[in-house]
Amino acid sequence: MMAEIPLVQMRNITKKFGGVTALLNVDLDAYAGEVLAIVGDNGAGKSTLIKILTGVYQPSDGQMSLAGKPVAFSNHAEAIEQGIDAVYQTLALADHLDPAANMFLGNELTRKVFGITMLDNKRMREETERVLLERLGVRLKSLDASTESLSGGQRQAVAIARAVYHEGLRVLVMDEPTAALGPQETARTLKLIEAVKAQGLVVILISHSLDDVFQVSDRIHVQRRGQCVGVVKTSNSNVQEVLGMIVGAEEAA
Amino acid sequence: MAIAVSEKPSITERLEPYIAIIGPMVMILAILVFMGIVEPARYFRATNLNLILLDAALYMPMAMAMTFVITQRGIDLSIGSIAALSAIIMAFLIKQYGFSVYVAVPIAIALGAVMGLINGLIITRFNVPDLIGTLAMDLVYRGFALVLAKGLVLARFPDFLTDMGRGQIPGFVPIPVLIGLATMIGGYVILKRTYFGRYTVAIGSNPEAAELTGISVNRHKVYAYVLCGACAALAGVMLTGKLNAIQATSAPYFNLHVIAAVVVGGTSLFGGRASIIGSFAGVLLLSMMINALVTLRIEFFWQSVASGVVIISSVALYTWMQKKDRDGSNRFLSGLKTPEGQKMLRFSAALIGVLIALLAVGALFAGDPNPSG
């Protein structure tokens, strides 16, 4: 299942904020078609690591490569251009707009009407319906309703659809996607993650919920106090072991 | 694996998006019924209906533009002064400098746009809150108008201008009504079909998300104020034509009147919820209400009481509706059954009762058909 060369390779990533070292010599590999979970306590450096990957932060030291080619991003837009996008916990949706408007927000499809550029709402709706169904297996009961009337899982689907609509997308980072969801919506979100993975993308999942992580991930990267304390194959591990790594019990033992 | 949801939306759920329009429509109906009982002969005369439309037409361009400003979580309190100042300058250009009216009118509208641009830049560049920034600029623009015109009343303008303000296409509607409707339709197209309209809703709905998707939030805020300024100037031009006169103190209550119309039409002061059709209905409602007060010979000053009551009750109603949204109970009727819904209902009933009582008292005491002055 896994390719020989990791699609994403991070080597010796170090990030310092003034005198505070948030990350120290962290390595991360992620292969196409896998879900890599990143777990760790608060302050373990999960978010910092991800923000470096998505170009929000720049590393103080270390290298990154994408499909074997060295890359460096000076902002988030450059990372998106290279095929790395993130779905944020807050989803970044405008609740009063319909799902199609949200999916194309900042990137609208247009057509000329008497020489004037107008938004092509019909085509955006059709595309949204197509992307949701074909790529995520989601059908909304109405594309006219505002996004705020959708369930948590459906909102998640719209946010993910926005990311995967970009043809060159290779890596999708999901930051705590299930944090605010009930059990049923969580199950739906995990299905969405599997759908994205099935298309050969890398999904990097940050989560506090080990239940979710064990349900959906292929490998688990454990962070503690700014360092990677180990990467385990999900199928060869269990919650106790990972929990032990998170809190540092392994070392003490 | 498909996450299909097949349940049909209930009737109340399907009605909900239209409540913005239903609100003012119900109030319009209430006024119609009330006036139909109390003063049918004078209220429903063709000349009176024409008066209502003429009054409403003046506010339509501003209500359209204000819908964009308010949807972006902004507010523009300077439109009355912008209207007065640009109309005064236009009047001077025509009367004193011999400008053609066809040149002076576009100049006035362009000046309004520039004043809107100044508002927008003050708010976005200097980070002055919308409320304070436009309130202060209201004073500034009004001050300039007073400085320019002193106490002068400039009157008697070319036909083109009076046509814009009160002209009538024989057997059809007044020309200003056509102008007003055209701006409303234009506003609807802008809201639904352009980047600016789309981003306006996005900015009001979730400014952080808008910023994150690469939308230039500040630029679109400035656009909204420019539109508002231009429309205020257009209203100033129409007002000059309607009265065939203009002075520095003209158009004093434009801002609150327009904001009341927009808010009663369902555009949320908290941003994101825009309704051009609602604003149109709101403008009609306010004009009908004020005309009703006049028809009943209730003192002019009660108008401002009525406008205030309309603003408070509609904002309270929509806030309550939004709160219900957050609670997650999606049904409008079930929302009404909660204790707070009951409180809200009683409050609205009391307000409507007071309004009707006021109208009735006015009708009783003002029965003398002879004009007082």
Image: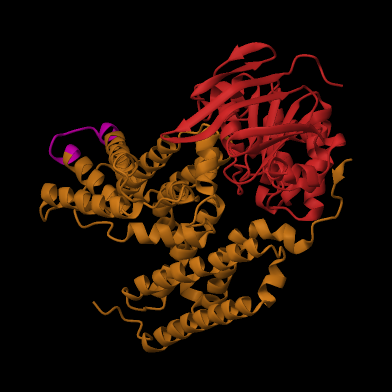
Q: Tell me the shade of chain A.
A: red
Residue B178 appears in the figure:
yes
Residue B82 included in the magenta stretch of the image: no
Residue B347 rendering spot, x and y as whole percentages:
53, 80
Asked where in the image residue B291 lies, by quadrant, the reply is: bottom left
Asked where in the image residue B322 lies, by quadrant, the reply is: bottom right
Extreme-top residue of the structure: A69
- Which chain does the orange colour mark? B
Extreme-front residue of the structure: A253
Residue B354 vertical placement versus A96 (above, below): below
Instruction: Classify residue A37 as left or right of residue A44.
Output: right
- Residue occupying image coordinates x 32% and y 51%: B79
Residue B349 rendering spot, x and y as whole percentages:
56, 81
Q: What range is drawn magenta here?
A: B93-104
Residue B177 vertical placement versus A162 (above, below): below
Question: Which is nearer the eye, B44 or A77?
Answer: A77
Residue A18 rendering spot, x and y as whole percentages:
41, 34
Residue B100 included in the magenta stretch of the image: yes
- Residue occupying image coordinates x 69% and y 77%: B337
Instruction: Classify residue B198 as left or right of residue B243.
Output: right
